[in-house]
Image (cartoon, rainbow, N blue to C red):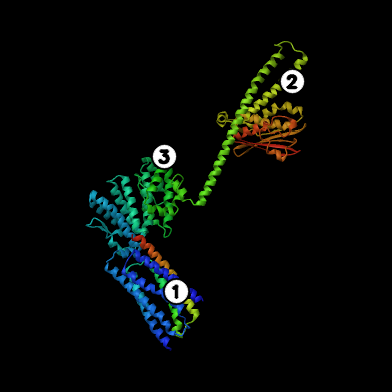
Amino acid sequence: MIGEILSFVNIILSVSILVVILMVYSVYRRVYLLWFILSFSIVPFIFVYSLIWSPGSPFKMGVVVYPISVIIIEVSMLIAQKNLIESIKSGEEEEYKMLLRDDIAILRAYEHLANFFIGRIVPLIGTSSIKELLESRIEKHPVLSGSFVGVDERLNTRALEEIVGKIEVEEISLAFYELISGLLELYSAFVPADKAIEDLRKATEKVMEKNAMIFDWIAPIVLFKTVLEPVLRKCRQEDIMEIAIMVNRSKSGIRVNKDGKIDVGMLYKEYPEKEKTDFIIDKFIYALNKMRPIIQQSIGEENANSMITSNFRKMPTNIKERLYGEGLVEKLPKGILEEEKVTLMSREKLIEELVDRRKKLENAYRELAEAELGKMKATFLDVVAHELRTPLTSIKTYVELFKKGKLGRLTKTQKEKLEIMEENVDKLTNLINDMLQIPSIDIKELELRKEKFPAEEVIGEIVEDCSTLLSEKSMSVSVNIPSSLAIQGDKNLLGKAIKNIIGNSIKYTPSGGKIKISAKMEGDKVHIKIKDNGVGISEDEIERIFDPFYTGNEKEGGMGLGLSIVKNIVEGHGGKVWAESTVGKGSTFHLLLPGGKND
Amino acid sequence: MGRIQAIMLLLNSIILILAALSFYYFSRLMKLVKVRRGAILATSGVFLLTGYVFFIMPWIAIGEAIPMMENFSYILVSIAFIILLYGVSRIYMDWKGAIK
């Protein structure tokens, strides 16, 4: 049973091999391939025969079919090999070498690339300069010895075939890179730089079409010479110099000269044996990231990004596809090939990105709505407060006139009632003033009013202001603030914030209670602690005490604006305020404010 | 020695001679040109030959088949075919890229 299964597997495999050999023949119709096809077409029949004939059958001699078949196969193979050797030896078909050998294939590709430019330079200046260039390169790279520009005005590198097998491809590539760079430079001297680059694109595309194996070796030329170099040349001379100094100092193997020409010859010496494409991409991204800030500074960010993107898009399609396939696009910095990034994104990634963007958009809308609402609230409060303050000022003025007897004499009772009236007008005025503090602190305006003031001094003044209230409730206050501590901010506003907290502590601490005020430096901030042994705040309330109009203890009255104003002022200064409390034991308010040491 | 054994010995001697000749030509080819994918093709050839030897050995030795050895030879041949399929596919890809 196992034998039958294995025979069946072998039939499938041998038929597959036969199909592939037929496909090879379809692209390269040669006689020796027909002999290979003949030899291999026998193989499936051997396994079909093994399914029909078994060793246990009466016709034992049937086994001779196997050796006979193998003999036929071997003879066909021998003829195929002999045929191939003779073809190569006679040199009838030069392309055999290219098909069979990597190094010859690469050599041919370089020759083709060089001849592309030679074909364009010769009509302009003849062959003498090309010959001189070749001689100088041979001097520098003996690997090129034997190559010459023939009477057909084309570079001939056939003599190199004898030695290429013994030399590393990296060395050959470096020599040809320098030869081709020289040719490109020579060509650029007679045509506009853009035309030379455009022709380099065409040449590399054709070479890739001929033999895709050259990709790893011409990719640096394409990336640096057709994408980055044209952008670099648009920069100001001093910026090019800056880039050159920076890049040349790095150990990237990339060199930039004062004209913005990029030399990547050194990269060929560093080529790894495997993952060459990753190596090139990484080197390119490194160089791009190094040069980009200066390029952007020189020709503008948008201009730089669009030029690099456009050069990428102009790149030969067959090279572009390979580079994109190896993940180049994903590694590019923001602003370059953005559309391609989106196209290359997988469906899932795209959905993720869309969901993410939607969330961001929703958040932005919410923030905008909140800001709008806040603005509306502020405007409303502003209008209401001002509208209330005007009649109050008028009432207060008349009350004062009555009190001074300027509007006629008053009885004692009338005077007493007027006192109450005046007191309530003052309360209302204070309340309106508080309401006006609710809108967000204008940071810009605050910057203008910022000053450094001693913490001890301002807190001392507040305690002094509250002395009447404190003595009414027989409360004691201890202040422990180092004299060296200084707060940075609007003295009036911060004073008001601290006063509000101290006032709150006095309000919610029973008679005979204690308030402790201390401060210390924490980094670049002043940490002020105001601790009382009052009624305390419950856990569910503590989170809301800084909300506007929140009144925890209704008995004490008030609009619930005091702590909200504190929060507003402190956060407006880039500080932080929070409270800790235990019901029945008291509360501690913490203020973290920008500060430092006294000068 | 039975008749089958004698015939098999004779035929397989020819096979061995041809295999040696084939190896000689392959070496010459390798000297002439450093054949791309040559190592893959050679490995596949070694597996094929070993598989065949295992298949045919019992017939030469005892004039009968040994099922276990036959199955083992089939496995070796399968491995050889897989390697060869990979080799010819790579050759096809290379050549397709080079010849348009």
Disc 3 secondary structure class: loop
Disc 1 secondary structure class: helix
Residue A263 in the image: above or below residue A577: below
Residue pointed to by mark 2: A420
Check the residue under mark 1 and report the chain it is in. Answer: B
Nearer to me, B40 or A39: A39
Which residue type carries mark 2? Ile
Which residue type carries mark 1? Val
Check the residue under mark 2 and report the chain it is in. Answer: A
> Quick check: A222 left or right of A358?
left
The quadrant of the picture occupied by the N terminus of chain B is bottom left
Give the crowd class for mark 1: few <14, some 14-19, many >=20 residues within 10 Å.
many
> Quick check: A490 left or right of B9?
right
Percent of width and height locating residue A412: 77, 14
Residue pointed to by mark 3: A300
Residue A336 in the image: above or below residue A519: below
Percent of width and height locating residue B76: 46, 74
Nearer to me, A535 or A553: A553
Which residue type carries mark 3? Gly
Q: Do tags 1 and 3 sit on the same chain? A: no
> Is residue A489 among the parts visible in the rendering?
no
Percent of width and height locating residue B50: 43, 76
State which quadrant residue A437 falls in.
Answer: top right
The label number, if any, that marks residue B77 in the structure image: 1
Question: Which residue lies at the image location 38% right of the left edge and 47% below the top edge?
Answer: A311
State which quadrant residue A530 falls in.
Answer: top right
